[in-house]
Image (cartoon, rainbow, N blue to C red):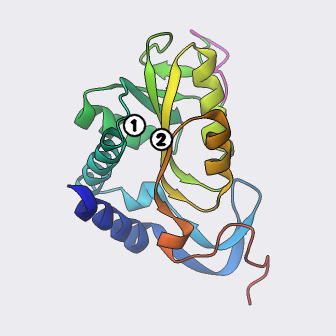
Amino acid sequence: MGVDASAKLLEILRSKGLTELREPVQLASGNYSRYFIDGKVALGAGDDLRLAAEAINERVTGAGVEFNAVGGLTLGADALCAAIAVVSGASWFIVRKEAKGRGTNRLVEGTRIGEGHRVLLIDDVVTTGGSILKAYESVRATGADVVAAVTLADRGDDARRSFDERGVPYFPMATYHDMGIPAIGTESATAG
């Protein structure tokens, strides 16, 4: 696995997930970009998803991080957290964007996480970190410990700063530099 898997994952993200558009589009963060990274499309093939899960697991455990649960905010984390759970043997969970308002009314579905859980927090593409930080707060509210955060691609530097402030190791599998695109907030709002 190792460098080879990380290089293959980067190539998958570039070739299958990155689209350069004629005109900028608004991202979930509110920022505009002509470069759109779609992690779900990039990992739509089972073999690509498996490779990503194995590369993430290797990178995190290779850094000495031990986790027993993996999850993040729906929809960006859904496929990844299930695949990582399969390759690592960890339990998986998904954080809803808001409570359903009926049934158990939980924000966190899947494994019932809480004290004793060492969570690997996942997201597919991070721009400013809003979604992964929302998941972070929901996980912490359960009493679980977030031991690391991982994203397939990070379009800026905000998430790293936020996790550094929280003392949580952060592992973007690809950065904007690796993807060959400008950092979020550095391109103009109109096509040039």
Classified by dominant secondary structure, the portion drawn in magenta counts as loop
Q: Give the number of the disc on residue 94.
A: none
- The numbered disc on residue 77 is 2
Crowd band around label 2 with a 10 angstrom C-alpha radius: few (<14), some (14–19), many (20+) = many
Secondary structure beneath label 2 = loop
Of residue 32 and residue 137, the one placed in the foreground of this image is 137
Quarter the N terminus occupies:
bottom left
Instruction: Tell me where residue 79 appears, x and y as whole percent.
Output: 39, 42
Left-right relation of 82 to 142 = left
Q: Is residue 103 magenta?
A: yes
Residue at horizontal 77 percent and vertical 57 percent from the top: 30
Q: What amino acid is found at the position of numbered circle 1 in the picture?
A: Cys
Residue, far bottom:
192
Q: Secondary structure at mark 1?
A: helix
Report whether 84 appears left or right of 128.
left
Reply yes or no: does residue 110 show up in magenta.
no
**Mark 1 and mark 2: span between their CA atoms?**
6 Å
Tell me whether circle 1 and circle 2 mark residues in contact (CB < 8 Å): yes
Going 50% across and 9% down the picture, which residue do you hit? 115
* Three-letter residue code for mark 2: Ala
The answer to whether 33 appears left or right of 171 in the picture is: right
Query: From the image, which quarter does the C terminus lie in?
Result: bottom right
Q: How many marks?
A: 2
Mark 1 Cα-neighbour bin, 10 Å: few <14, some 14–19, many ≥20:
many
Q: Position of residue 78 (x, y in %)?
A: 44, 38
Picture quadrant where residue 139 is located:
top right
Q: Residues in magenta?
A: 98-104
Label annotation for residue 81: 1
Q: Where residue 87 sits: x, y (%)?
A: 24, 37
Residue displayed at 40% across by 61% down: 42
Residue 34: image quadrant is bottom right
